[in-house]
Image: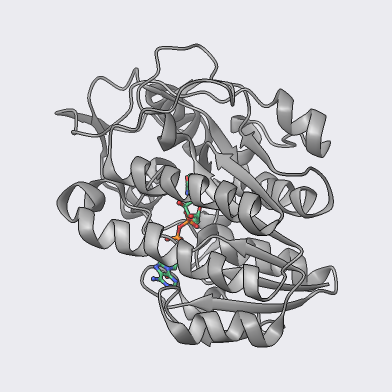
Amino acid sequence: MKAIVTGGAGFIGSHLVDTLVTAGAKVHVIDNLATGSGEYINPGATFHFLDIRSQEAKDLILRERPDAVFHQAAQVDVQRSIHDPGYDAQVNIIGTVNVLEACRQASVKKIIYASSCAVYGDLNTDRITEDDPTDPISYYGVSKLTPEAYIRIFHRLYGLPYTILRYANVYGPRQTPKGEGGVVAIFLDRIKKGLPLRIHGDGEQTRDFVYVKDVVAANLAAFQHGKQDVIQVGTSTRTSINQVVRLLSKLHGTDLPVVYEQERPGDIKHSCLDNRKAYEKLGWQPKYDIVHGLEESYHLLMQEA
Ligand code: NAD
């Protein structure tokens, strides 16, 4: 299999590239290293230092004619989207349209698009399903949702096959202490530096934390199975930020100090994604719960110098 991974130098993309290379796929990475790191790019993959908005990125897809394009590249920082909605839209919307144009012309067998639970906004629902209404409350949510509509129309007009994966809050090794769902990475970073943990709001806001290895598995399953679906990639479990602190305190062997600060605009209160459709369509289920995912992340980080 030949695959192109956009954002393959980033947190999720680099884990995906590792797994694809190990499985024997020929992998090309498109990344402009805006937030990614050259160190994370698997040496078995071919790296192209390109912007997804460029003609060169388009030409590369046309030249390589891959079986699959895993489109992970994005501006992922919710707060940055609030401060600079133009840049956010350029990368996430215009960049994705550029990738889609190339996929259509190259007759790519499938595009797998990394969407987000941010498309729902602040739904007052215990467990969100794919049929729930989308009503983003940040520009990032809008810029992740809009490409979904483009993807559907590229399919309707040109038959481009796709699967849209709406990730919950992904965490694990290599996540920068910035960006969407970065709370675990931020906490681990501060524990390592001996700093108190900072929480925006009262800490009772909840998230659905899904481990990066499970997200990689969902991407691979999405290449093999499912047709023109929108599928949530989550654990169907709510975890509060205070619970994360308690779990990390247990791993660290001491009560971690916490400072509570003001809530931030654009932040969602509760978010939990029902994962039954992922099982039905892709045969995918998460293998890690928050306890085991945090344990692995904590120990890997502490092993680093
Ligand atoms: P990340 O920032 O680590 O990865 C994004 C990658 O895209 C980086 O390597 C960055 O350099 C690259 N990139 C950014 N702009 C680019 C451009 N114009 N051209 C080429 N490359 C560019 O973030 P991540 O957490 O790994 O996110 C991967 C995908 O998953 C994104 O599409 C994001 O919206 C989505 N997602 C992430 C989460 C999460 O919790 N991390 C949740 C939902 C959805």
Q: Residue at x 25, y 50 (%)?
A: 81
Give the side of residue 59 with respect to residue 161, left or right. left
Q: How many marks?
A: 0
The residue closer to the viewer here, 168 or 151, is 151
Relative vertical location of residue 61 with respect to residue 183 in this rendering, above or below = below
Task: Where is residue 152? Give x, y as percent.
Answer: 58, 46
Q: Residue at x 63, y 62 (%)?
A: 70
Residue 171 makes an appearance in the image: no
Give the side of residue 109 with respect to residue 143, left or right. right
Task: Where is residue 14? Give x, y as percent.
Answer: 59, 67
The residue closer to the viewer here, 205 or 247, is 205
Please, which colouring scheme is shown?
Answer: one colour
Quadrant where the N terminus sits is: bottom right
Residue farthest toward the front in the current orientation of the protein: 157
Give the side of residue 148 with respect to residue 289, left or right. left
The residue closer to the viewer here, 231 or 287, is 231
Task: Where is residue 192? Give x, y as percent.
Answer: 38, 53
Relative vertical location of residue 207 with respect to residue 197 in this rendering, above or below = above
Relative vertical location of residue 120 with respect to residue 299 in this rendering, above or below = above
Q: Residue at x 45, y 29 (%)?
A: 244
Task: Where is residue 144? Give x, y as percent.
Answer: 42, 47
Relative vertical location of residue 216 with respect to residue 132 in this rendering, above or below = below
Residue 214 makes an appearance in the image: yes
